[in-house]
Amino acid sequence: MDTTPIDPGHIEVLQILDEHGQIREGLEPALDDATLLKMHRGLVLTRTFDQRMLTMQRQGEMGTFAPNLGQEACQLGQVIPLTEHDWYSPSYRSFGAQIWRGWPMDHLFKLWAGYHEGFPPPPGVNDLPFSIVIGSHVLPAVGIAMGMNYQDKSHCMVVNFGDGAFSQGAVSEALNFAAVNAAPVVFVCENNGWAISTPLAKQSATDSLAVRGLGYGVPSIRVDGNDILAMTVAVDEAAQRARAGGGPTLIEAVTFRMSLHTTADDPTVYRDEALVEPWNARCPIHRFEVYLKSKGLIDEAGLEQVRSECDAEVLEARQQFRDTAIAKPREIFDHIYGQLSPELEAQKQAYLKRLDDRGVE
């Protein structure tokens, strides 16, 4: 039996902006100045929102959530090339992408604080709600892409999942089905190195997850996930191919989980923090700011202004959340089934009686 390891050398690796903020020769995309500045603001707003929500969680004002410190470029690059007609299926660490797609921040605050009205996507936004069940959202995303084929629509679906989700059978089924049926879907595997406490080396016998796509006949690429230009270009090319009938693409976005898996997690228990240090130098925001300054698009004063404006925007959204997030305990049975079973109806009535007994409106 041939035991020669699979050679991932024919998997293209894309990096446009290196760790020092320098463009690799001949690869700079043709993005106008306004778009580049909008991308930068999106990165800063994502991190500001993340940091503010972490503070709120520690103060008991927010539920458990998954911080995305260091993964901002990976998040935004997935959705920058999408049109309003394209669809996006996020995972639970995708709120930066959701903000870009049109989710108001107070809406996302409600989502993570456990208010029902925070979960449905805003009107006019073609996004799915995220799923906590790892990898379960990938197959429905392919289903929506298949619907585009049936309706002869020239749109695409981008679905995001982590390296841990790639260990789930549903993701492999989704890749195979999409490949066989040329579904217009872009699979983005956000490889941040850790599936909660499990490092990639204990999940996969290959260093590259992109090689898995080749087995299903899916064009695959490995991208520097901390390079917002590379992420945007890779997703844009894959989306254009999908819309033109070229079928699916797998993008492995290589990044690193700088912070907690969720706010219920303590990574110091299972991870040597020395592993985090090299990734500080690969900060997606810093390298993009070096690039923007080299182009003369912004200076230190301009950067500080963006940070200040983003902080004010997040604080305004927090106040909006505080003013409108009203608990409705009597409605918790209303969003499960169209018609409750007799058992659930009995539970509902017992629950409502307890609220009555305690004087809860």
Image (cartoon, rainbow, N blue to C red):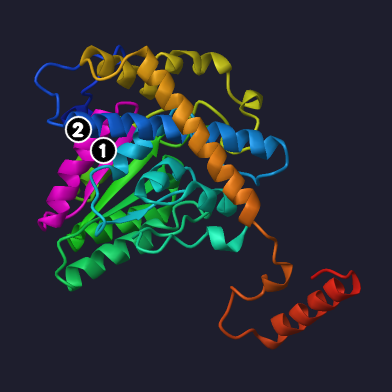
Give the labeled residue for mark 1. 211
Left or right, 133 with respect to 217, comes to right
**Residue beneath the point at 54% across and 13% down:** 274
Q: Amino acid at mark 1?
A: Val
Q: Amino acid at mark 2?
A: Ile
Span of residues in magenta:
225-253
Looking at the picture, does residue 306 appear above or below residue 356?
above
Q: Quadrant of the C terminus?
A: bottom right
Looking at the picture, does residue 121 appear above or below residue 352?
above
- Residue 103: horizontal and vertical position, in percent? 43, 52
* Distance of label 1 from label 2 (alpha carbons): 7 Å
Residue 361 appears anywhere in the view: yes
- Residue 133: horizontal and vertical position, in percent? 52, 55
Looking at the picture, does residue 269 appear above or below residue 68?
above
Q: Is residue 231 within the magenta segment?
A: yes
Q: Is residue 307 within the magenta segment?
A: no
User: Residue 339 is drawn in which quadrant?
Assistant: bottom right
Q: Which mark is residue 359?
A: none
User: Residue 14 is drawn in which quadrant?
Assistant: top left
Of the two numbered discs 1 and 2 on the same chain, state the one appearing first in sequence: 2
Residue 5 appears anywhere in the view: no
Give the labeled residue for mark 2. 11
Rate crowding at label 2 as few (under 14), some (14 to 19) or many (20 or more) other CA atoms within 10 Å.
some
Q: Secondary structure at mark 1?
A: helix
- Residue 68: horizontal and vertical position, in percent? 48, 34
Q: Name the one closer to the observer, 81 or 24.
A: 81
